[in-house]
Image (tube, coloured by chain):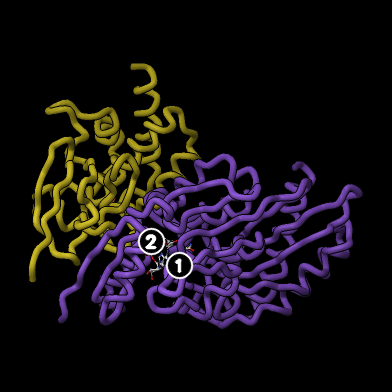
Chain colours: A purple, B yellow
Amino acid sequence: MEQMRYEAPDTVDAAVALLVGAGGETRILAGGTDLLVQLRAEWIEPDLILDVKKIPELTEISKENGGFRIGAAVTGAELGEHLGVKKAWPGVVEAVELIGSVQIQSRATMGGNLCNASPAADSVPALIAAGATAAIAGPNGRREIPVEDVGTGPGRTCLAKGEIVTSIFLPSRPAHSGDAYLRFIPRTEMDIAVVGAGVSLTLDGGGKCSAARVALGAVAERALLVDAAARALIGTPVDDAALDNLAKAASAAARPIDDKRGTKEYRIKVSGVLARRAAQAALERARQS
Amino acid sequence: MAKIHVTATVNGDEVEFLCELEETLLDVLRDELHLTGSKEGCASGDCGACSVMLDGRLVCACLVLGVEMEGRSVETIEAMAAGDELHPLQQKFLEHAALQCGICTPGILVAAKALLEKKPDPTETEVRFWLAGNLCRCTGYDKIIRAVLDAAAEMRVS
Ligand SMILES: Cc1cc2nc3c(=O)[nH]c(=O)nc-3n(C[C@H](O)[C@H](O)[C@H](O)COP(=O)(O)OP(=O)(O)OC[C@H]3O[C@@H](n4cnc5c(N)ncnc54)[C@H](O)[C@@H]3O)c2cc1C
Ligand code: FES
Ligand code: FES
C-alpha cells in the first residue's frame, strides 16, 4: 500500500496547491464523521488527507449583504450557538442540528454533509429551500453555485480536481419569511432520513405567499428542488387547498428506491405529508417574523 | 511506515506520541498512552463508548485522527475522579446500579459531565436526548437517567 499523507494548511491557496500537486486520490477532512468511517471500512484509500480545519476562512461565520457566509468547516455545534443565523434561518439550523448525536455535532460540518453527497443528507434540502449558494475555490479561481448543483448522485459531486467548498452563503431575509426542515425516521434520534423535506417561504403584507422554495431529500439519487410544489404555494394564503396541491406536487416529484428503511410507495406518500407539515411550520415562523 | 510525531495535552499534561495516520485518537489513547478507560464499541461514531472532551467539546475519539491532535487538548474518563474521590456522577452510578458490564459507562459519564457543565438542572427529556449518542446494551437506560438526575441534584446543592 502507498503511504498516506496528512496535511493541514492554513490558507485556501495552499490547500488547492496541495490538492493539485498530489498524485492519486485525495480527500478533504472536515469533521471526519463520514470520512473516518469510510477509511476504517476501507471503502477509500486516499494518498493525501487534507485537513481544512486550520483555514480561518472555512471556520468563520460572517455577515454579508444582510445574509450570512458560513465557513464550510463550521461545526453543527458552532452553528447552533450562532443566534443570528438561528433567528434568520431556523429551518437550516434545525436540519444541521438533526445530524447525529451531541458527539457528532461537535465535529460534523455543512461542507462535509454537502460534499459527502448522501441523498439523505439532512442539511441539504434545507439549504436548497433556503436558496443557499456554495462558494468553491480551485486551481482556476473561485466560483459560486447553487447548493442543488453540488451533489450529482450518491457520493458524487460536481467538484473538479483541486476544488474545495470554502463556504455556504445564506441570503438576507425579507420580512415575514420562515423556513423549516422535517425528516421522517423510525426513531427520534440517530438515524438516516427515510424522507426529508425543507420549505422556505415569504408572505406579502396581505398574508399571501410571494416566494417559496421546496426541497426533498432521500427520495432520489440526490436532494431535489421541487418547483411545482413551490408554485402550489405562491400567490395563495397557504390554505388547505394550497397545501393539498403542494403535497401532491411533492409526492409526484419523489422518485425513491425501495430499501430497508421504507418502500417506494411509502416514501412517495410521506414526501407529500412531510412537505405539507414543513410548509405549515415555515408559515407559522413567517407570520411571527 | 513512518510514524508522525504529535504533541498534545492529555488530562492537563503535555504528552508526545508517535502515531500512524490511520490511528484514531481512541487508538492513541488506548494503545500508545495506555489510557484504556475509553472503550471501543463500534469504531463508527454510533455507540459513544469512546466519548472524550476535545478542546471542551464532547466527541467520539474513534472519529478523530491521532494526527489531528497536534496542539490540542483532550480530557478522558481518567481525569474524572479527583484521586481516590469519585466524581458525584460516578458515585451516583454506583448507588443506582447504573451499570452492568460497564463498557458504556466511561463514555456515558464523560457525556453526562459535559451536559451538567452546560446545564446544571436538565429535565429527564434533556438527559435522554443528550445521551442519545451513547448506547447501553445492559441497563435499559432508566437507571442511568436516574443516576444522572440524582447527581445533578446533588451537585446543585454542594
Ligand atoms: C453516528 C453518526 C450519525 C450520523 N447522523 C447523520 C444524520 O442524522 N444526518 C446526516 O445527514 N448525516 C449524518 N451522519 C453523517 C455525517 O455526520 C454528516 O454527513 C456530516 O455532516 C459530515 O460532515 P463532516 O465534516 O464530518 O465530513 P467529513 O467526514 O470530514 O467529509 C465528508 C466528505 O465530504 C468531503 N468534504 C468535506 N468538506 C469538504 C469541503 N469543504 N470541500 C470539499 N469536500 C469536502 C470529504 O472529503 C468527504 O468525502 C452521521 C454520521 C455518524 C457517524
Ligand atoms: S467506539 Fe466510538 S462511537 Fe462507538
Ligand atoms: S452496562 Fe453494559 S453496555 Fe451499558
State the SS at label 1: strand
Query: Is B118 or A67 nearer to us in this picture?
Result: A67
Local SS, label 2: helix
Q: Quadrant of the C terminus of chain B?
A: top left
Is A156 on the left or on the right of A124, as rendered? left
Q: Is A174 on the left or on the right of B1, as rendered?
A: right
Q: Is residue A24 visible?
A: yes
Per the image, the residue denoted by label 2 is A12
Amino acid type of the residue that numbered disc 1 sits on in the rendered structure: Ala
Tell me which corner region of the image, top left, top right, bottom left or bottom right, holds residue A265.
bottom right
Chain under callout 2: A
Q: Is residue B132 visible?
A: no
Question: Camera-side residue: B69 or B95?
Answer: B69
Question: Does B39 sit above or below residue A255?
Answer: above
> Where does residue A112 sit, x and y in percent of width and height?
43, 64
Q: Position of residue A185 (x, y in %)?
A: 55, 63
Q: Read off the residue under disc 1.
A: A137
> Residue at the location (12% across, 28% down)?
B83
